[in-house]
Image (cartoon, grey):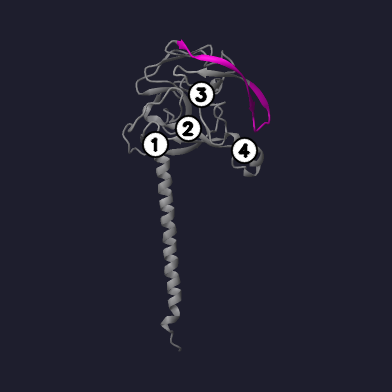
Amino acid sequence: MAEIDPTDIQPSAKVATKTDGGAWETVKTIIIAVVVALGVRTIAYEPFNIPSGSMMPTLLVGDYLFVSKMSYGYSRHSLPLSLPLIPGRILFSEPERGDVAVFKLPSDNTTDYIKRIVGLPGDKIQVKEGILHINGKAVKRERAGEYVEHDAWTGRFRRVPRYLETLPNGREHYILEESDNGYADNTQVYTVPEGHYFGMGDNRDRSKDSRFLEDVGFIPRANLVGRADVKFFSVDGSAWKFWKWGSSLRTERFFEGIE
């Protein structure tokens, strides 16, 4: 039987070693990328998408947002899976009236919700004949034409009255108000507890928000996730149907700030 020359197997051995090393480098790169992504998501910005029309006309179904985690400091809900590693809230900064904020739904502490902060701790909030009142004073509301809503699924259009609302701190934003006599257009007086906030959707007649105490209610400070700062992508319809992007992308909304 012929003897095997040890030099004949050296190239194969070197190739195996190089392959093993390359695989480990790939794994390390993936681990580092995941850690960096989780770090950015936890500390700086987290992406969200809008699945409902409760914040129209400010936010539309199919908008994708970056939410600033730094704006209000950090709580357990800043962490992946809301891991209970942060007691209360650290590095806290008070939200401003008019901020569009993402928070965990108080009733389950799991579901992500997005509304506009209109009430701060100690405020008295009431809606009378469709007009928001803060601490007994009516918020300024001016008619600003109509908003034409397009249903991507049915292809139908409808016109909704649009108003420019000005909060006491001067922040302005558009709201939709189909009627001033709807179920939530005349409410009780809500006194916002200490450490809590009152949020409302800009689509006033089609928003389940803090007016509905059993479903949403007051927003605990610890439940704040962050402030919605910018839209980075927007598509009219199902985002996964990329072959339709040519006609459904709303490029005018790309990288647009959120007022």
Residue for badge 3? 201
Looking at the image, the residue that sits furthest to the bottom is 1
Q: Can residue 158 be seen by looking at this rendering? A: yes
Q: What's the residue type where badge 2 is placed?
A: Asp
Q: Are marks 1 and 2 in contact (CB under 8 Å)?
A: no
- Count residues near mark 2 (Cα–Cα under 10 Å), then give few for <14, some for 14-19, many for 20+: many
Neighbours of disc 4 within 10 Å: few (<14), some (14-19), many (20+)? some
Q: Secondary structure at mark 1?
A: helix
To which residue does mark 4 refer? Answer: 249
State how far apart marks 4 and 3 are (Cα). Answer: 24 Å
Does residue 90 belong to the magenta stretch?
no
The image position of residue 142, as x and y in percent, is 56, 15
Residue shown at the point (41%, 60%) measured from the top left: 24
Q: Position of residue 78 (x, y in %)?
A: 39, 36
First reached walking from the N terminus: tag 4 or tag 3: 3
Q: Amino acid at mark 1?
A: Ser
Residue that lies at the very extreme toward the front in this rendered image: 170
Q: Is residue 204 left or right of residue 159?
A: left
Q: Secondary structure under badge 2?
A: strand
The N terminus: image quadrant: bottom left
Which residues make up the magenta segment?
A: 137-159
> Of marks 1 and 2, which one's residue comes earlier in the chain?
1
Q: Determine the image quadrant of residue 52.
A: top right
Q: What is the C-alpha distance between the residues marked 3 and 1?
A: 22 Å
Q: Is residue 154 above or below residue 164?
A: below
Residue highlighted by disc 1 = 78
Would you call the spot at circle 1 few (<14 residues within 10 Å), some (14-19), or many (20 or more)?
A: many
Disc with the residue nearer the chain's start (4 vs 2): 2
Residue 220 in percent (x, y) is at 38, 26
Q: How much space separates mark 1 and mark 2, taking CA atoms?
A: 16 Å
